[in-house]
Image (cartoon, rainbow, N blue to C red):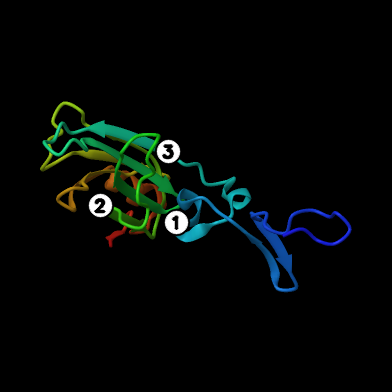
């Protein structure tokens, strides 16, 4: 359907438009379902770390992905770069109140489809061993050093959702 006077086609598909309420734009699924939808430019002080592990399970989806955003730690099934992970359904999600995760890594030698050990380091010096598949917290290391150096009782305080 052309406009009179030889103008542009009116059937073009728009990826963004502006109204008096604001800017609307078409987002890819991975960006739309991003946890807590924090704008990218405000994350400058919160580095994101990513860890991968292959569990060699029978379903063919053996890869697992762990990443942190601020004080939150997420654990997902990873299906490769061509198929986005469903970010609305994490296997495990933990929110830490007292301190934030700064690094993490899986124990690749003991990882199985039923259990995987994830070591998480925190900004206040604690180190926590967790199993995101069983949703268990095994041990908290270096809690004593934190208490003696700050004279207060604050632990990572992770909550599982």
- The location of residue 102, given as percent across then percent down, is 42, 41
In 3D space, how far apart are the residues under numbered discs 1 and 2 (Cα atoms)? Answer: 15 Å
* Label 2 to label 3: alpha-carbon separation: 17 Å
- Which is more N-terminal, label 3 or label 2? 3
Residue 124 visible here:
no
- Spot occupied by residue 107 in the image (x, y as percentages of width and height): 21, 31
* Label 3 element class: loop
Q: In the rendered view of the protein, which quadrant contains the C terminus? A: bottom left
Q: Nearer the viewer, mark 1 or mark 2?
A: 1
Per the image, the residue denoted by label 1 is: 33
Residue position marked by numbered label 2 in the rendering: 91
Task: Point out residue 133 in the picture as x, y percentages from the top left corner.
Answer: 18, 48
Tell whether 66 sits left or right of 15: left
Disc nearest the viewer among 1 and 3: 1
Comparing labels 2 and 3, the label whose residue is closer to the camera: 2
Q: How many marks?
A: 3
Q: Is residue 93 above or below residue 129?
A: below
Q: Which residue is mark 3?
A: 49
Report the residue at 34% width, 34% height from top. 80
Label 1 close to label 3 by CB (< 8 Å): no
Q: Which one is earlier in the sequence, the residue at label 1 or at label 3?
A: 1
Q: Secondary structure at mark 2?
A: loop
């Amino acid at each position: 359907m052309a406009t009179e006077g030889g103008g542009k086609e009116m059937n073009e598909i728009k990826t963004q438009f502006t109204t008096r309420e604001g800017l609307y734009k078409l987002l890819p699924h991975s960006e739309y379902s991003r946890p807590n939808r924090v704008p990218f430019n405000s994350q400058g002080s919160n580095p994101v770390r990513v860890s991968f592990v292959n569990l060699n399970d029978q379903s063919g989806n053996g890869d697992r992905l762990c990443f942190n955003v601020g004080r939150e730690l997420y654990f997902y099934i990873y299906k490769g770069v061509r198929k986005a992970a469903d970010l609305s359904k994490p296997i495990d999600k933990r929110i830490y109140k007292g301190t934030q995760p700064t690094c993490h890594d899986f124990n690749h030698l003991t990882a199985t489809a039923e259990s995987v050990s994830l070591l998480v380091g925190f900004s206040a010096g604690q180190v926590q061993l967790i199993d995101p598949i069983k949703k268990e917290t095994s041990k908290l290391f270096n809690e004593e050093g934190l208490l003696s150096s700050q004279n207060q009782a604050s632990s990572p305080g992770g909550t599982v959702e």
